[in-house]
Amino acid sequence: MKLIVAEALLECLREQGVDTIFGYPGGTVINIYDVLYDRKDITHILTAQEQGAVHAADGYARATGKIGVVLATSGPGAANTVTGIATAYRDSVPIVVITGQVARALLGKGSFQELDITNITKTITKKNYLVTDPETLPEIVREAFEIARTGRPGPVLIDIPKDVQQAVIEYMPMEIDTSYKTANSTEMNFETNFLLDKAVELINNSKRPLIYAGGGVKISDSCGELLKFAEKVKAPVTCSLMGTGAFPGTHPYFTGLAGMHGSRCSNIAISNCDLLIAVGARFSDRTVCKAESFAPYADIIHIDIDPGELGKNINTKIPLCGYVKRFLELLLEKVDEKKEGVWNRQIQSWKDTYAAAYKSSGSLNPQYLLNKLHELGKGKSILTTEVGQNQMWTAQYYPFTDPRTFISSGGLGTMGFGLGAAIGAAVGRPDCRVINIAGDGSFRMNLSELSTISKYKLPIIQLIMNNSSLGMVRQWQKLFHNQRYSHTSLADEVSFTKLADAFGIKSMRISEDKEVEDVLKEALESDEPVVIDCIVHPDDLVIPMVPAGKSLSECIDNIRVC
């Protein structure tokens, strides 16, 4: 059938199962928006700005497992997408960003709102396209979605000049398989079989095994297999920040977060295990801290779909490259069932000895707040976070039990991510209550998205850990820079409750533990958006903490060196 490219684009999106777009209109995408006007099968969420749209698409993708889609205009509109694209790239999130561009005849001439967005995003996308031949549009869209969802997922950008959008092409509908693709079938050749057998031998002979779970477990929907595997070999489980929720946080084998702000039990276990089984994890510097002393007594088995991650940061004895789910299934078939022993009792002893119990410097304890949130919400909420102390407190103190309920910017550490991501999660998962945990600094980054929450009446709860400072930077200044608090104070007259009121959003304020339960109950029982200003003390720290460049055994706990 004959369609203009703008129409063909929306038809291609429907082929991919897209029913939601996050975006912001402008001159170079006005043709697409004109076609969108008549479409009843695609919902468009108008965000406050383009960065919020990308974060929303990201949150939508993480919460649903679908591909998030963004539509933005050229120039500053496209530029505003860059931080969100980089965030998705670093955390392996499948999104497709569609940008408008000036007409082909104006390219390279410094035209109004012209920006070479394909070159700008070359290093933060899996692939990007400038569509110069209208006839190629359907093929490009189909390929873009395939790339976004295949193997290690990630963002793809399609830049479409304005005149291309108006061109008439022949469009042929296709039926598309929109399921996750592994990029390879984990081909069991001689080398892979040999390595798998060696891994089985190491697991069967190990006396002190430890599983390190990363975000790849959630991406590949392998959480069930991981649970069965851990229970079969009786191995305790720790996780990276992005692996939070991959293994039930209430399970007796779970030791907590690993690394710089990991639990004492997790870090001691890493330092004493004789076998570390890394599953869908990338050994980032925030987990490893000091590579030379990481897991000093352990052989390491590393399972990951990205060959570039194997042996990149840590020497690996058994690298298994392929689909995480398939390797876990094979290991489940081959390994011996074990009984709990001395190692499990030792892990439990460390958990009991170093149980998280931090006394607040003020009247409102972040740990108590998050524990109570889990209790009252019955662990069924989706939590998004900003970046900083709020993020680490959430990962430390809230026991996630479902894989797609913790959404945070891990690799890039993007302040301002959480509110947009909460919008996407709320749109994609209306069956779940969505709560964004923010610091007062990160909340200011994208607070304009309160207008989106208000406009669409999204029942998001916004908890602001308000310590009148850039808390994590201040913490470093306190611990390592002689308390020289250079430009980290946010002590001003900003009222977050009045701000929420201005957007037509209900607001509350708490400053003591005794107020927490009643306020959280009221917020959770409401079907409206709520902003809660939570006053915490600026000297409440994220601990334990391993200083940069130190080994996991050299931590700070309650302002004491361990």
Image (cartoon, rainbow, N blue to C red):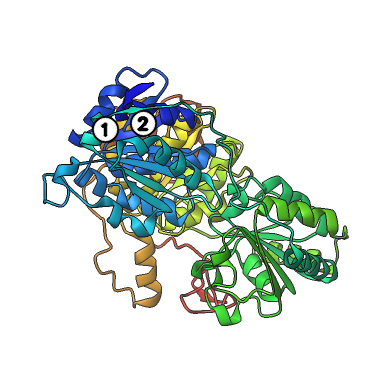
The residue singled out by tag 1 in the image is 165
Residue 70 percent coordinates (x, y): 36, 38
Quarter of the figure with the C terminus: bottom right
- Residue drawn 80% across and 59% down? 234
Whether residue 6 sits left or right of residue 475 in the image: it is left
Say what amino acid the circle numbered 2 marks. Answer: Leu
Q: Give me the disc on residue 466.
A: none
The residue singled out by tag 2 in the image is 9
Indicate the quadrant where residue 473 lies.
Answer: bottom left
Is 267 or 543 nearer to us in this picture?
267
Indicate the quadrant where residue 163 lies.
Answer: top left
- Residue drawn 19% across and 46% down? 75
Q: The residue tagged with tag 2: helix, strand or loop?
A: helix
Q: The residue tagged with tag 1: helix, strand or loop?
A: helix
Quarter of the figure with the N terminus: top left
* Res 227 seen here: yes
- Residue drawn 60% across and 39% down? 379
Q: Measure the alpha-carbon separation of dots 2 and 1.
A: 9 Å
Whether residue 235 sits left or right of residue 374 in the image: it is right
Against 191, residue 531 (above or below) is above
CB atoms at circles 2 and 1 under 8 Å apart? yes
Against 457, residue 473 (above or below) is below
Is 355 or 60 nearer to us in this picture?
60
